[in-house]
Image (cartoon, coloured by chain):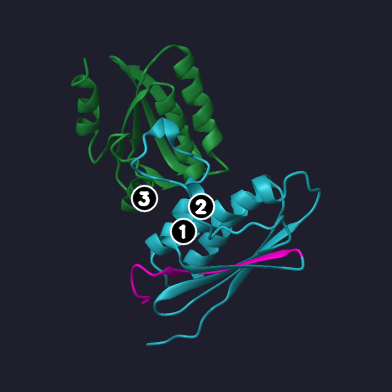
Chain colours: A green, B cyan
Amino acid sequence: MINLSNRHINKFELFEVSGRLDTANADELDQSVAKVLEQGCKYFLFDFNKLEYISSYGIRIFVKLLKAGVKISMVIKSDAVQEIFEMGGLENALNVKRSLREAIKVFTQTK
Amino acid sequence: MGSQQMENHSFTLGHLVKDIDQIEQAISELAEKWDVDEKSLFQLNLVLEELISNTMFYGFKDRDKGSIRVDMSYDDTHIHVSIADDAMPFDPTIEVDMDKNVNLDERQIGGLGIMLSQQISEDMIYSSTEGKNSLRFKIRLNDKPK
């Protein structure tokens, strides 16, 4: 199960994703992210406060976005989920934060 | 009770990626049945998904049948897992070329799943005999079973 919604706020696109970002479900986010990218947005914030699970199949979406020149920040609540990003060595590149305020700051401090 | 008897749990998947959500189902059943903490089950779920999706995507590529069997049990300290399949031989204990210091453009994302599995699991042992892959590993429990 995955639930996602997205909306544009100032200069970034906010994605709220809950449930599971795994092999069975991650394509949904991949498609929704691709649509926003097509519109030319280069700042993506992912609210993962309600994300329960992620696997490498979900993580590759973010690596792909980085390679496309997108600036990313995300807020993660689950320790187990955060640990997966750390094991992959991606917590800095993806600006993994503990609060929405910190995640937003990543963009407001960018020129 | 100190050392409770191990409660085995097994399931079998087909060779197609559409079967992958059976892993999540099996984990939910374990959550009901086993006194194992949530984080350890999360990690078990992840390692199973990474290894089995890899087998489905690559090991069974262009095959029209195949099966994957998973056997699991636990004791006071670990979850014990064995996976057997008849896919193309593949050893997931091989060294994965994933240097975290390399910049992202140069990094291979394909090996990420295998790398995560290796980091989370312990004592992963692979063998291939008569066209069958057999893999055993353990996952250390984050909390002692109640």
| Residue B106 versus residue B128 in the image, above or below | above
* Chain identifier of the residue bearing label 2 in the image: B
Q: CA distance from mark 2 to mark 3?
A: 12 Å
| x, y percent for residue A89 | 34, 44
The numbered dot on residue A87 is 3
Does the CB distance between marks 2 and 1 fall below 8 Å? yes
Q: Residue furthest top?
A: A39
Instruction: Give how far across and how far down residue B7 sits, in percent.
Output: 54, 78
User: Is residue A21 visible to the viewer in this orientation of the structure?
Assistant: no
Crowding at dot 1, Cα within 10 Å, few <14 / some 14-19 / many 20+, comes out as: many
Checking the image for residue B118, the label placed there is 1
Q: Position of residue A99 (x, y in %)?
A: 22, 37
Direction from residue A96 to residue B57 in the image, left or right: right
Q: Is residue B30 above or below residue B90?
A: below
Q: What crowding class fits label 3: few (fewer than 14 Cα within 10 Å), some (14-19), or many (20 or more)?
A: some
Q: Are marks 2 and 1 on the same chain?
A: yes
Measuring from the top left, give residue B13's x and y in whole percent: 68, 58
Does A94 sit above or below residue A12? below
Between B115 and A11, the one lying in front of the other is: B115
- Marks 2 and 3: CB-CB under 8 Å? no
Q: Secondary structure at mark 2?
A: helix
Q: Are marks 2 and 3 on the same chain?
A: no
- Residue to which mark 2 is pinned: B114
Q: Pinpoint the chain carrying mark 3.
A: A
Magenta-drawn stretch contains B140:
yes
Magenta stretch?
B131-146
